[in-house]
Each structure stands twice: as structure tokens, then as C-alpha cells.
């Protein structure tokens, strides 16, 4: 279950998510009313809700009582087992000690804290509303509020970022002893302030080799600090892997509510749909009892097979050959003739008797590998 919470104090320069700046408390509560209204009309897949993720935006700007109302609405229609992972994305400086205790009380048991950098000048250029001291204070507050499952995020490949600065960011974040660390390569999205700045030449991005060095630094330094890499961008202490993200990578069904949220029916229905991105238009539709869906697509077995492989390859455990065979009725190598050999020869992919997985070199250029599976012309045995 994904719940999009679009509230923000300010738009970050790299952000292209559906957000709204300056929404007051009453309007925020009405938005959460719309989320509840949408949820109540959703068709539900069978089985329990295994994770709930409040993403944004800045969900930590939502009142705990509104987060609680959404969780109550979920439990009123679906089975939410005890121990279900319930994550709230948060930005440093947007939480108080009392709010944290209240979030815990209503059912949030995991927090993902967006730190992004350990240098004040990078935070200012990204339009982040915090400094490093505030981020550290937020971590201490979260621990005092008994949050024992804490993730922190950072971005590498920032304009004018040096390898030494990235090393400092890694050391800073891990010194706070989080349970999970997400380290993302910067993506310059069209239409964002960052894209315009890069286009004008006022922002200079690090070269490909330097970005690769940053990725290598993360891969080599995090394990020594007790964090195992289990996915391209994610490291965790044992047992603290993100259940929510793993559900995406393993092609499990998910429902998204809120502006711009996406849903997937799972491999049996093979349907993906999404809501409109305009926040206030979404509110009007959902509060009026209308379906806020803006579009949908039906996925062929060939599309599902390609997605299953590239999503599975994101995890360091790789793709199970037997699971692929059971699901699609054909061997993976037969489904993608002529694809595996060249990738192995280029040392981007390796094969074991049970799996295929990315090599270290393949992880550095993962998108090149994924594209080969997503664009392959599959034989009729997969997609008759």
C-alpha cells in the first residue's frame, strides 16, 4: 500500500513528484479525507497488506491524527497483520518530539529520513530546509521516541560534489547508526529547476567516472560498517531490509492512493493504473466520489517477463531461474534468446545453476542491462 502525501514547505530543485507548497492545516486534513475516500472505493486484491508506505512530498508535515485516520481506514477494509511495516517519509526539521510519539501511537513503526547531503552548501543548492545538525537532532528524537527501524537517504552525483564530500556524507550518516541506508544517484528530471540550471550551464554535474567512483565508495565502505548491500541503492543491517521496496522489485501487487499514485494488479491481472498528478484536482475528484484514475495500461506476458527480470536484477540475490520458469512456463534463456550471452561476455551479468545476477561492473551500469531485457523481442512461447 502506497499513500502519497504531497505537502511541502518548498520544492527541492531535483523534485518532479506531485507536491503542493503552502497548504494550510485544514486543507491538508481535507487532502487526507480524499485519500480515505479513494481507498474506500478501491477494488482490493486478495491477501493481507504487507506494508504501508507514506511517501511524498513531506509526509511528516501531516498531523499524526490524519495518518492514523488513513491507517484505520485501511484496517477497516483489509487485513493488516500485526507487525506490518508502516513507513513514514520525513524531513529533518518538520517533526516535534510530541508528533513523533503520536506517529508511533497511531501505528507508524519505520521512518525514512531524507538527509541527502552532509554539506550546508549542497543542502542550500538543493533547497533542502534543514542543516546537518537538524538531521542529527531528528535521529536522536526518533530514537528517543522508540523508533527502532530508521532509514536515512543521501544523493550522490550532485552538482560540483567531490568524492571527499561524498565520503564525508557516508561517514556522517553511518555515525548515527541507522538501520537502513539508501544512497541514490542523482537523476536530473526534465522540467525541474535543476534541469534548467544544468541546461543554462550554471550547474555542473560530476563526470561519469567520478559518479562511478562515488558508487564504488559506497559499495566498499558500507559493509565494513555493518550494512549489507541487498539492492542497487540500498544497504541495511540484518533483518532491516525495506519490505515495501522489495514488494515492488518482486512484482507483488500494490495499491497507490493520492495524487499521482500508481497501482499494479500483480501478475495475474497484469494491469497498471495511476492517478492524476494535480493535487487539488485529485482532491475534487476523490471527495466527490469519482474515480481519480487518469490512465491505465494492460501488460502482456512479454512485458511482465521483461519487468520481472530487470526488477529482480536490482536485488543482489538476482533472479531465480526456477521461479521464472514456474511463472512463465519457459526457461529464462529461451525467453530472451541472444541476450544473456553478450551480457556475460561483457562481464555485466553472471549465471549460477539457480540464478542470474549482476556483477559489480553490471551494477554500475544497471540501466544498460535492464534495457536489454525490456526491449528484447520475446518468442511466442512467452507471449502467444
Image (cartoon, grey):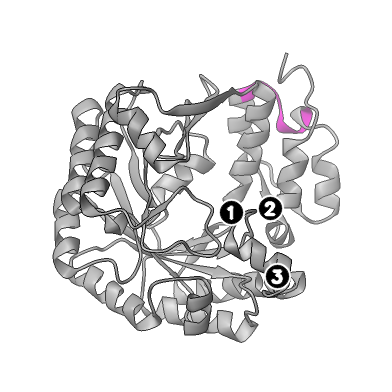
Counting other residues with Cα less than 10 Å from the Cα at mark 1, is it few (<14), some (14-19), or many (20 or more)? some
SS at circle 3: helix
What is the span of residues highlighted in magenta in the rendered image?
328-334
Counting other residues with Cα less than 10 Å from the Cα at mark 2, is it few (<14), some (14-19), or many (20 or more)? many
SS at circle 1: loop
Instruction: Give whichever of discs 3 and 1 has the lower sequence position.
Output: 3
Residue 40 placement, left or right of 174: left
How far separated are the C-alphas under marks 3 and 1? 18 Å
Tell whether label 1 touches label 3 (CB within 8 Å): no
Q: Position of residue 88 (x, y in %)?
A: 31, 54
* Label 2 sits on residue: 358
* Label 1 sits on residue: 316
Q: Residue at x 58, y 54 (%)?
A: 316
* Label 3 sits on residue: 212
How far separated are the C-alphas under marks 1 and 2? 7 Å
Q: Position of residue 124 (x, y in %)?
A: 48, 77
Q: Position of residue 103 (x, y in %)?
A: 19, 55
Residue 57 placement, left or right of 149: right
Q: Position of residue 225 (x, y in %)?
A: 46, 76
Residue 330: within the magenta?
Answer: yes
Tell whether label 2 touches label 1 (CB within 8 Å): yes
Q: Name the residue nearer the viewer: 314 or 119.
A: 119
Q: Residue at x 21, y 33 (%)?
A: 73
Q: Name the residue nearer the viewer: 192 or 377.
A: 192
Amino acid at each position: 500500500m502506497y499513500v502519497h502525501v504531497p505537502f511541502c514547505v518548498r520544492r527541492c530543485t531535483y523534485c518532479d513528484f506531485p507536491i503542493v507548497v503552502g497548504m494550510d492545516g485544514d486543507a491538508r486534513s481535507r487532502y487526507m479525507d480524499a485519500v480515505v475516500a479513494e481507498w474506500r472505493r478501491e477494488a482490493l486484491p486478495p491477501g493481507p497488506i504487507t506494508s504501508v508506505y507514506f511517501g511524498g512530498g513531506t509526509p511528516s508535515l501531516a498531523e499524526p491524527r490524519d495518518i492514523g485516520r488513513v491507517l484505520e481506514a485501511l484496517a477497516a477494509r483489509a487485513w493488516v497483520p500485526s507487525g506490518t511495516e508502516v513507513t513514514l517519509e520525513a524531513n529533518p526539521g518538520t517533526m516535534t518530539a510530541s508528533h513523533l510519539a503520536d506517529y508511533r501511537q497511531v501505528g507508524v513503526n519505520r521512518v525514512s529520513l531524507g538527509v541527502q547531503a552532509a554539506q550546508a552548501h549542497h543542502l542550500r543548492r538543493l533547497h533542502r530546509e534543514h542543516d546537518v545538525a537538524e538531521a542529527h537532532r531528528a535521529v536522536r528524537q526518533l530514537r528517543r521516541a522508540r523508533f527502532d527501524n530508521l532509514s536515512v537517504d543521501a544523493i550522490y552525483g550532485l552538482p560540483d560534489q567531490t568524492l571527499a564530500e561524498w565520503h564525508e556524507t557516508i561517514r556522517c550518516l553511518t555515525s548515527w547508526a541507522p538501520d537502513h541506508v539508501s544512497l541514490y544517484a542523482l537523476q536530473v528530471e526534465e522540467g525541474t529547476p535543476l534541469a534548467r540550471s544544468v541546461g543554462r550551464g550554471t550547474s555542473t554535474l560530476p563526470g561519469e567516472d567520478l559518479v562511478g567512483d562515488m558508487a564504488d565508495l559506497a559499495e566498499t565502505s558500507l559493509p565494513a560498517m555493518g550494512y549489507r548491500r541487498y539492492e542497487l541503492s540500498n544497504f541495511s543491517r540484518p533483518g532491516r531490509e525495506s519490505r515495501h521496496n522489495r514488494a515492488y522489485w518482486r512484482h507483488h501487487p500494490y495499491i497507490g492512493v493520492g495524487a499521482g499514485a500508481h497501482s499494479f494488479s500483480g501478475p495475474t491481472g497484469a494491469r497498471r493504473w495511476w492517478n492524476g498528478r494535480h493535487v487539488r484536482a485529485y482532491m475534487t475528484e476523490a471527495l466527490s466520489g469519482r474515480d481519480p484514475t487518469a490512465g491505465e495500461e494492460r501488460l502482456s506476458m512479454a512485458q511482465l517477463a521483461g519487468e520481472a527480470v530487470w526488477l529482480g536484477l536490482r536485488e543482489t540475490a538476482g533472479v531465480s531461474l526456477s521461479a521464472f520458469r514456474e511463472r512463465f512456463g519457459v526457461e529464462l534463456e529461451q525467453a530472451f534468446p541472444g541476450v544473456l550471452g553478450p551480457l556475460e561476455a561483457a562481464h555485466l551479468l553472471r549465471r549460477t545453476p539457480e540464478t542470474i545476477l549482476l556483477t559489480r561492473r553490471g551494477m554500475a551500469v544497471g540501466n544498460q542491462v535492464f534495457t536489454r531485457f525490456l526491449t528484447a523481442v520475446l518468442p511466442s512461447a512467452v507471449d502467444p
